Amino acid sequence: MKGARTGTTGRMDLDAGPSENTQRWARFVATCLIGGVVIGISLLGLHFGAPHQPSLRIWRRKKKPIRVYMDGCFDMMHYGHCNALRQARALGDQLVVGVVSDAEITANKGPPVTPLNERMIMVNAVKWVDEVIPDAPYAITEDFMRKLFDEYKIDYIIHGDDPCVLPDGSDAYALAKKAGRYKQIKRTEGVSSTDIVGRMLLCVRERSISDNQNHSSLQRQFSHGHSQKLDDGGSGTGTRISHFLPTSRRIVQFSNGKGPGPDARIIYIDGAFDLFHAGHVEILKHARGMGDFLLVGIHTDQTVSANRGSHRPIMNLHERSLSVLACRYVDEVIIGAPWEVSKDMITTFNISSVVHGTIAEVNDFQKRECNPYAVPINMGIFKILDSPLDITTTTIIRRIVSNHEAYQKRNEKKANSERRYYEDKAYILGD
């Protein structure tokens, strides 16, 4: 009996088991369905949420970059131009640069020293520049301004706090200011293309009167940052010699701040890099392509004078250093590099290869008794590179000398325009 009852109870439990399991399963499925509906409604609420709640789609949308525009002649480009571009880039996320055409420069200022193709190379090489527009107009016209806003998606037009005056004395950026899309940066004091032209004319004049005790070496003047006026028979025209005062802050602003990686192939190239020009840019670009890190040695003023004459350099050591540092192909510079490349220097900087271009001011080093590249040559790490452009500092100086009257008139024309601008401004303020 007992066994029978047990058997019967066992059969009843077995019969009841599947029904209870089914109920449990049904409850589990219902819970999942209800939970899924709740989660789905929550997600829909986030997606189509109330106006005060941010949509996930909007939150994920990429922020529109601020695009700024700056134009210029960029003739005989120098560190002042580069610093202006650096400041302009800091006002946005992308910097678009307009390079004024040769014809526009001639009409408004006088003939340019460097043609458009060379000026384009220079501007494209500045590490703060994202895009370049060739043949930009000298003045911002209504049509061109609309093109900048609509086609190039420019948010702001940038210029320095120095006046940009048209031949009629009006402001070249008047329309941009009126549109409320103009921003201003601080001009870099101590240098201008006009100033550099004057330095070169003085350089040529000094060579012709080198015996005159009243005209000391330009190299000494540049090195010590002095300034003086030309003694030209009582004329009011003259030029300032460099009075640029370098600071560690300015050098840091121009530096990359990054060293080479542990296995980087470091390429070294040295020179004066005076009147930094398109020929310099192209050989640096070529050298950078040979490795992972380009180290550039910049010779002292004294070294340059000893090897190229007392009338050189035109730009002092720190001016030349900033111009080279602004180049996107350069990773680091040695300010005041030695004339001779030593074994200790190669070891210290872990230099893999030392290079030199075929076009240079001083290219007879292999014939000299004291070859500055003797050590890297003996180590088998020296290489001559074909220079892409046949341009040297002497090339630039010859352009000035051959047409010096036109450039003197250009300087006077600019001075007269600026004087008229300030006189008109003073008159308006007086009213």
Image (cartoon, rainbow, N blue to C red):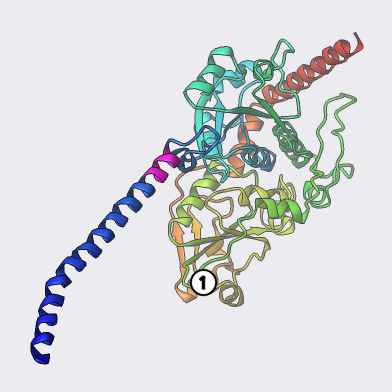
Magenta span of residues? 41-47
> Residue 191 or 219: which is nearer the viewer?
191
* Residue nearer the viewer, 302 or 29: 29
Report x, y in % for residue 312.
Answer: 71, 48
> In which image quadrant can residue 332 be found?
bottom right
In the structure shown, which secondary structural element does the residue marked by tag 1 occupy? helix
Q: Residue at x 72, y 18 (%)?
A: 165
Q: Position of residue 342 (x, y in %)?
A: 60, 73
- Say which quarter of the image contains residue 13: bottom left
Name the residue at 16% across, 71% down. Answer: 16
Q: Quadrant of the N terminus?
A: bottom left
- Asked if residue 42 is among those painted magenta in the image, a careful observer would answer yes
For image coordinates 88% across by 15% down, the residue present is: 426
Q: Which residue is mark 1?
A: 376
Q: Position of residue 77 (x, y in %)?
A: 63, 38
- For residue 172: magenta? no
Is residue 2 found left or right of 307 in the rendered image?
A: left
Q: Position of residue 278 (x, y in %)?
A: 54, 41
